[in-house]
Image (tube, rainbow, N blue to C red):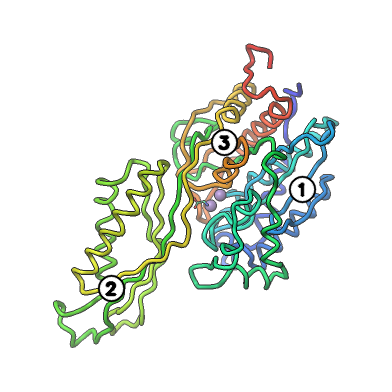
Amino acid sequence: MSHHLRCSLDRLREDLLALGQIGRNPDDKGLYRMAFTEADMEARRWLLDRLRAAGADAKLDGAANVVGRWEGADGDLPTIVIGSHIDSVPAGGIFDGSLGVLAGLECMRALRDAEVKLSRPVELVAFSDEEGRFGGMFGVQAYTGQLTLNDVESMKDPDGVSLVDAMKACDLVPSLAMEAARKPDRIAAFLELHIEQGPVLEAQRTDIGVVLGISGIFKWKVKLLGKADHAGTSPMDMRSDAFMGLADFAHEIPRIIEEDGSERSRLTVGKVDLVPGHPHTVPGEAVFTLVGRDTEPDVLRELAKSCRKVLSAIARRHRLYFEFEEMSWLEPRPCDASIATAFRSAAERLSLSHIDMPSGAGHDTQFMTDVTRAGMIFVPSANGVSHAPDEWTAWEDVHNGANCLLQALLDVDAGSEGETLETGG
Ligand code: HGY
Ligand code: MN
Ligand code: MN
């Protein structure tokens, strides 16, 4: 067993910094690498080159997931899949998603340098649109056979751009996404390394977070429809002011969570458009996104129900109409216990501290759990910041995460995941 094997931090840092230059905004304020933009496609081309340089057979599958494959020593055993995503949110950081993909690549290079050939084949995957420009986790849904052609043809981004048009603009054939589905019995496990994107590991001075469960996420596009009016002549008590409705809703969010949520519930209004958007006109229309999250399916449903009730009460109060479109609904998912055990024993073997924790963010792992044993680990985020230009993870933590991923990969390949040092595993 190659317990002594380690990743090269120098190579991994070089890759992270190089990929972190693709899609960087001219004002240097973070990455703009949203799914199926030119920057995203440039990043995929860059990754394909890096995978081939590391000896992988690399391609884009039907959903444009970047897939690098290394064959195993023992015939056609089911594949171990590792990876994450390389698309970003607007003004995103260089570690979200990219760490899991590039650490997986570095694991494969470390195995090659040590002339260790795993029994099983390995696929390293950068899943398309994990950040949900078109709703949510398009690439991993295609990879796990959970997409319908209607999904592909109906997905669109908050500005109304369709997935179909965005993929065609990248010379991709959207319908081929249906061919990306892998047979579940050909997948042995899925392992993902990701930054925590929160403050817990740093606050608790802990090296590794072993993820037990991943939040579900609903994303709505909400419209409050009132009446555009003159900002000077319309009396305050006679307006149908859509912004005031939105402002009221914002004040209700803490009470909704208090009464119908849990301490893991999150409600976020991330994008707002007021129409007609003129300083001297009462906004007749407020169009905004509402994202709700929780790790428990029932609580997530309660949150959604409560938001709907509050929005319709507010609409009545302000003489508004209210409508919403559900852009996506991603169910919460537990991670696989045996993979969690593999990560814990890997951390212990590396003398890394570790805690079990939930994930408030959504991740590709939550769809991979539907088809195989899937699990993930976190490494600390500096000041808990993510989805922002100053997202950062210390290089030592990057190295710890990559080495933990490597050791867990070795255990899962050997079928010894879950054995601890005492048993000589
Ligand atoms: O927003 C999220 O939960 C993740 O970063 N996709
Ligand atoms: Mn991510
Ligand atoms: Mn993210």
Residue 232's disc is none
Q: How many marks?
A: 3
Mark 3 vs mark 1, foreground winner is 1
Mark 2 vs mark 1, foreground winner is 2
Report if the beta carbon of the residue with label 2 is closer than 8 angstroms to ligand 1. no
Q: Is mark 3 on a helix, strand or loop?
A: strand
Q: In this view, does 302 lie to the left or right of 113?
A: left
Q: Is residue 33 left or right of residue 302?
A: right
Residues tagged 3 and 1 counted as in contact (Cβ below 8 A): no
Q: Name the residue under label 1.
A: 68
Amino acid type at image mark 1:
Gly
Report if the beta carbon of the residue with label 3 is closer than 8 angstroms to ligand 2. no
**Residue 100: horizontal and vertical position, in percent?**
64, 44
Residue visible at 64% across and 38% down in the picture: 190
Residue visible at 36% across and 79% down in the picture: 275
Q: Mark 2 points at which residue?
A: 321
Q: Name the residue under label 3.
A: 377
**Residue 191: horizontal and vertical position, in percent?**
64, 37
Q: Is residue 271 above or below residue 393?
A: below
Q: In this view, does 309 lie above or below 317?
A: above
Q: What element carries label 1?
A: strand
Residues tagged 2 and 1 counted as in contact (Cβ below 8 A): no
Amino acid type at image mark 2:
Tyr
